[in-house]
Image: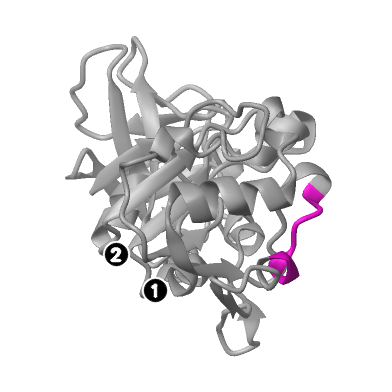
């Protein structure tokens, strides 16, 4: 899978797509979105597309960091999921305040059309983009050369609730990692750093399961995971170098009992 990092935005028509010039062929089918967690709803948007145009960091972490949601995945995990879905090319917008000022029309013309050579775009219902969020799914209709697919909300469960990152976060915070995995399409996997006593530290940027005992994996190796109240994870039988980054996967809750889960194992 090819990874394309866009250049910082420059003023002037046609200049924002220059980082992609000559690197893609016309006729791309492009799915556009942040795709945090790459859940089942996102997968429906991506289905049938050979290219993904995504934003990293999450726009809310730039525009409103205090109210930004905890992330369901990091870039590495997200790219891995795209690869498993058969995506051939990922273009990453290194989102910052400069990118937030790019008008929606310039974004479509410079990046989607001129940069990626798109003939087809797929977005989720309610997708907004461009300066001030002025761009909507209707914006794409102004471009005759572009076919647009708008994917409605995907529902799952007996109550027909929509699959959303918000719903998944709520389940994880409640410790229900199995139901979260059903909506994600894969078990929750987060990056963590090994601290000096062998525990794992999950950054506050990421959602974290409720304190308790879980079954899961560290770098693919099965183990028991005790989530503590101080955002650390005690791992049964773990042996990793202090300061190393690992992937921790939560597959099943054994029990959740905050009163019996101390901050220090």
Q: Locate residue 197 relative to residue 261 in the image: left or right.
A: left
Residue of label 1: 47
Counting from the top left corner in percent of width and height, residue 20 is at 40, 39
Q: Which residues are magenta?
A: 133-139
Residue displayed at 37% across by 68% down: 49
> N-terminal of the two: label 2 or label 1?
1
Which residue in the protein does label 2 denote? Answer: 85
Separation of marks 2 and 1 at Cα, in angstroms: 8 Å
Location of residue 1 in the rendering, given as x and y in whole percent from the top left corner: 23, 49
- Whether pointer 2 and pointer 1 mark residues with C-beta atoms closer than 8 Å, the reply is yes
x and y, in percent, of residue 200 in the image = 38, 26
**Is there any visible trace of residue 250 in the rendered image?**
yes
Front residue (pair 158, 39): 39
- Evaluate whether residue 35 shows in this view: no
Helix, strand or loop at label 1? It is loop
- The quadrant the C terminus occupies is top left
Q: Residue at x 68, y 62 (%)?
A: 127
């Amino acid at each position: 899978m090819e990874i394309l990092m866009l250049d910082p935005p420059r003023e002037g028509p046609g200049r924002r797509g220059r980082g992609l010039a000559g690197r893609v062929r016309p006729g791309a089918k492009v799915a556009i979105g942040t795709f945090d967690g790459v859940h089942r709803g996102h997968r429906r948007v991506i289905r049938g597309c050979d290219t993904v145009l995504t934003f990293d960091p999450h726009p809310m972490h730039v525009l409103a960091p205090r109210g930004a949601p905890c992330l369901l995945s990091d870039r590495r995990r997200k790219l891995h999921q795209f690869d498993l879905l058969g995506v051939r090319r990922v273009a990453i917008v290194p989102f910052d305040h400069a990118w937030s000022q790019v008008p929606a029309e310039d974004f479509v013309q410079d990046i989607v059309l001129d940069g990626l050579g798109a003939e087809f775009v797929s977005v989720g219902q309610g997708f907004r983009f461009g300066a001030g969020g002025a761009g909507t799914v209707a914006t794409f209709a102004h471009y005759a050369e572009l076919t647009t697919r708008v994917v409605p909300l995907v529902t799952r469960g007996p109550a027909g609730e929509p699959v959303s990152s918000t719903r998944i976060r709520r389940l994880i915070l409640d410790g229900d990692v199995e139901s979260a995995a059903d909506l994600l399409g894969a078990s929750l996997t987060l990056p963590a750093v090994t601290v000096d006593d062998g525990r794992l530290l999950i950054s506050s940027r990421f959602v974290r399961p409720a304190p308790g005992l879980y079954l899961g994996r560290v770098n693919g190796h099965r183990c028991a995971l005790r989530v503590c109240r101080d955002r650390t994870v005690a791992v049964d039988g773990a042996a990793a170098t202090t300061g190393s980054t690992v992937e921790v996967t939560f597959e099943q809750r054994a029990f959740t009992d905050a009163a019996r889960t101390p901050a220090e194992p």
